[in-house]
Amino acid sequence: MSLANVPSVLLVDDAHDMLEMLRRSMNAMGLTPFTANNVVDAIELVEHGPVHLVITDLNMPEVSGIQLVRYLGEHFPEIPVLVITGYPKLEDAVHVMKLGAVEYLVKPFTQQELRDAVERVLSTLGGRTHQPAAQEEMREHFHGILGRSHPMQEVYRIIDRTPNNRATVLVTGESGTGKEMVARAIHYNSTFSTAPFVAVNCGAIPDQLLESELFGHVKGAFTGAITNRVGFFQAADGGTLFLDEIGNASPAVQSKLLRAIQDKEVTMLGATKPQRVEVRLISAANNDLAAMIRQGTFREDLYYRLNLIHIHLPPLRERVEDIPLLVDHFNQKFSKELGKRSLRIPARVLETFACYPWPGNVRELEHLVHRLVILKDSAAAMDDLPAHMKMEAPRSILPDSMMSLAEMERQHIRRVLEAEGQNKTRAAAILGIDRKTLREKLKGLG
């Protein structure tokens, strides 16, 4: 089954914890979740992207879930609706069913009850029923992103759902996982890919300058403002603005960001008249925004506005199967840049890579391969790796009490040969035997 046929689920609830629980449940079911904490944002997502199922709470401030069910019944009757509520009333249940809801679930409910309800609702989709993730098309490359692992397939699937709308996206993950690459993939996978893509590192700009850089300023707005200058929002008009390390934004900048998202207008520092901008905003964070909200250092209303669509990038240690693919890519890339033949990376080195925790994630792996390509001419060896990396002994070479002596000897000889690029003279010296003895052992061990 193609990724395009995987059902997408819009989750609508004003409670952050409930939204997060629902999102994780949908991911576990192999579905593509979008989230909204209010009805207005939910309607925007429905109008601009394919949505196959809506799960909504009823009791929400300003516009209620009942009004959302009514709107969907009138304008999108083909989209089934599952209603969840913590305040069950018989009249509400009857009302939403008449408006078009097909399921009604009362909080608190179990994961199994949720799964059963979702499967019943999806069964109304007829020919578009969901198939297990294992049957989906697996991709190794996607707009510059590499990875064949299941977590990366989920990332690709969500990006595939965002080509025709300007819904905000929040990308989370540890430093070095490739959040900007995901932002670029979202932009270049969209219908406005020819428009500007502007990337801003909020952590690299001093607090007192970030507001001016984002929204621009007019002459005389502050000391040193000798001319009018547009900000990043105006520069990205019609395209995508990527805000990395959004958690570093000051309270004043957070307030203006919220206004810009809500009103689609920005006001330059020192100006009185706002300017209309049409920008898709993608934000990224490697810190815990939910914890910052609890600490009062990040606005909860801004978080919900930024987090209409959430993409989490896994650390490299959780997608080890992607390491050989990444190593080969970086090897080919840097070898071509230097006009050299690509290095041979022995299996022993790849085993070490698989067991290393990679605190710097893909960026650390890229820098290491770049270093190896610069320093080596034909093959990498264990001696070329940093000492701290060699301390992470591959599990496959740990002593096994059930392994025969002959098998242990065979594996040890193989590893030494691989580490030395199949040079038998150097391997024999390391093993403490002469070359003839090594040749005989190789013959005897097959």
Image: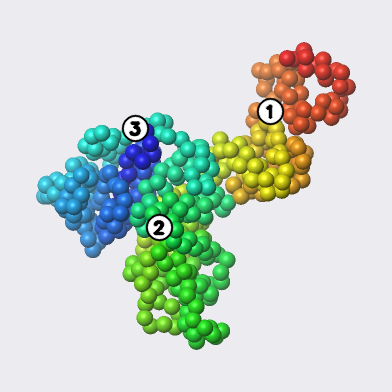
Left or right of residue 249, residue 80 in this image: left
- At mark 2, the secondary structure is loop
Mark 2, other Cα within 10 Å: few <14 / some 14–19 / many ≥20: some
Q: First in sequence: mark 1 or mark 3?
A: 3
Is residue 171 at least partly visible in the picture? no
In front: label 1 or label 2? 2
Q: Residue at x 46, y 48 (%)?
A: 312
Q: Report x, y in % for residue 306.
A: 40, 59
Tell me the CA gap for discs 1 and 2: 51 Å
Is residue 406 at least partly visible in the picture? yes
Q: Report x, y in % for residue 120.
A: 24, 35
Q: First in sequence: mark 2 or mark 3?
A: 3
Can you tell which mark lies on residue 131? 3
In the rendered image of this protein, does residue 57 appear above or below residue 126? below
Snapshot quadrant of residue 1: top left
The amino acid sitting under disc 1 is Ile
